[in-house]
Image (tube, rainbow, N blue to C red):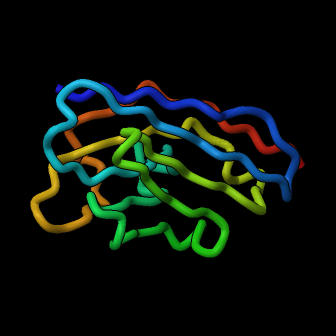
Amino acid sequence: QVQLVESGGGLVQAGGSLRLSCSTSGRTDSRYIMGWFRPAPGKERDLVAAISWNGRVTRYADSVKGRFTISRDNAKNMLYLQMNSLKPEDTAVYYCAADQDYGGVSTNPAVYDYWGQGTQVTVSS
C-alpha cells in the first residue's frame, strides 16, 4: 500500500503561482508513475500532469502546458506541481495519484491505484 498526502493548496489571485506537494509513504520500494488530477466537466477526475518514475517522461493537459510543471524527488518520496499564471478556471481540488510503473505514463485516472485526499486550489479573478 502507498499513502499519498497533498499540501500547498490555497487561495491565489489570477496570474499568481502555487506549488503543490505530495508526500508518499508506505511501500515506496516499487517504482511508481505519479500524476496530478482534478475534476472536469463530465469527468470525476481528469489529467493535469503525470510523470514517469525517473522523471524523464511527462504528460500535460493542453490547458496547462507552458504554465504548470510536474517534478519529483524520489530520494524524498515527493511529487510536486508548480503552477504559474493561474487562471480562475484552474480552481479545483487537486489530487495526487500513483500507479506502478509498467513502462508507460498513463493519462487515464482509472489506471491509478493510489490516491490522496486532495488539496483545494482557488483562483480569484
Residue 111, visible in the rendered structure = no
Residue drawn where x is 56% and y is 63% of the image: 69
Q: Residue 30 falls in which quadrant of the image?
A: top left
Residue 65, visible in the rendered structure = yes
Tell me the quadrant of the picture where the N terminus can be found.
top left
Q: Residue 87 falls in which quadrant of the image?
A: bottom right
**In x, y percent, where is residue 36?**
44, 49
**In x, y percent, where is residue 66?**
63, 75
**Above/below status of 24 relative to 18:** above
Left or right side of 58 for 123 = right
Left or right side of 40 for 68 = right
Residue drawn where x is 66% and y is 68% of the image: 67
Left or right side of 77 for 67 = right
Residue drawn where x is 59% and y is 68% of the image: 63
**In x, y percent, where is residue 62?**
53, 73
Residue drawn where x is 33% and y is 33% of the image: 115
**Above/below status of 22 relative to 64:** above
